[in-house]
Image (tube, helix red, strand yellow):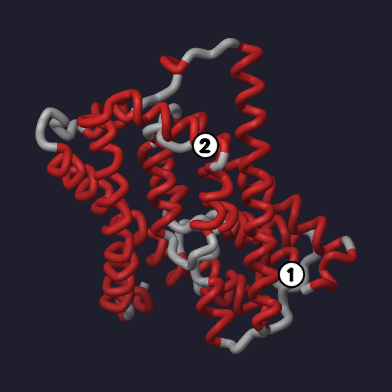
Amino acid sequence: MEHIIEHLPHILLHTLEETARLIPFLFLTYLLMEFLEHKSGDVSAKWLRSSGKVGPLLGGLFGIVPQCGFSAAASSLYSGRIITVGTLLAVFLSTSDEMLPILISHEASVALILKLLLTKLVIGVGIGFAADAGIRAIRRNRKLTPREEPTIEDLCERENCRCGEHFAVSAFRHTVYITIFIFLFTLAINLTVHGVGEDKLAALLSSRPILGNLLAASMGLFPNCASSVVLTELYLSGMLPVGALLSGLLVNAGIGLAILFRNNRPLLNSLQILLFLWSIGVLFGIVIDLSPLHTLF
């Protein structure tokens, strides 16, 4: 406890910095969503949803940019069903959070960086397209109608944001609400990480075949940059195999998962996405570690 109190000013400052970086992404995202609701109606929303056929590719390309703001934006867009679940998964799986800055700061080879980014991109895009194709098949078989899906209006009603006002004001309200949530949630995570200690987290992951993949993927669920930092540092120090690294980094979507659980309904849908994401991370990590693929890195 004394350790946390001593570092509380640093923790608060770090939390503010993390939260502040997301605000532009969140505001622009909600501005788009409010515009679609207030000005363009169902026509534009349906057009965007139909463009989901290439959405996973675009989501994967945006996701590899080292900025968790894209995962936060994707969660909000998916909650209003502006993008498909495949696009959301492509963003989550390809995003690298702090991996790229850490690799660059340690002067990792360009070849290694490109291989890791390309692996995450290929997995993210591939899983995204597969997920969308599977869901389309299920909808055809069950003959689901669009009315059974949540909409932007449902999200707006839950937020109680007085959506009759100008769409920019509504977007601002949404941004304020979610920014407060992100700050409090990130602060709780940062306090927990400082309380447990990164050294103890690292000790759980090092030199444990298969179990290391399971633990790394579980650690990747932490909606915080600390997990990607620890995972990358362990890999660079030779204490973590590349498959376990990818298990954690494929799952790690920054604050995106927290926003998904905050905004998306039904809750079961968010739980299904989380479990699927974790399973993909574990599966691909184990395959890479136990096959000759690990020699490519």
Q: Quadrant of the N terminus?
A: bottom left
Where does the image place residue 237, in percent across and percent down from the top left?
68, 84
Work out whether mark 2 precedes mark 1 in sequence or the reverse, and give the earlier one: 2
Residue type at mark 2? Gly
At a point 26% along the width and 77% down the height, the residue shown is 9
Query: Would you identify the image quadrant in which residue 82 lies?
Result: top left
At a point 54% along the width and 79% down the height, the residue shown is 102
Looking at the image, the residue that sits furthest to the bottom is 107
Where does the image place residue 221, in percent across and percent down from the top left?
54, 54
Looking at the image, the residue that sits furthest to the left is 165
Circle 2 Cα neighbour tier, 10 Å, few/some/many (<14 / 14–19 / ≥20): many
Q: Is residue 292 above or below residue 3?
A: above
Separation of disc 2 and disc 1 at Cα? Answer: 31 Å
Where does the image place residue 3, in percent across and percent down from the top left?
38, 78
Query: Would you identify the image quadrant in which residue 69 lies?
Result: bottom left
At a point 30% along the width and 70% down the height, the residue shown is 17
Q: Circle 1 — which element?
A: helix
Residue type at mark 1? Val
- Residue at image mark 1: 242
Where does the image place residue 71, in percent across and percent down from the top left?
45, 53
- Residue at image mark 2: 52
Q: Circle 2 — which element?
A: helix
Mark 2 or 1, which is nearer the eye?
2
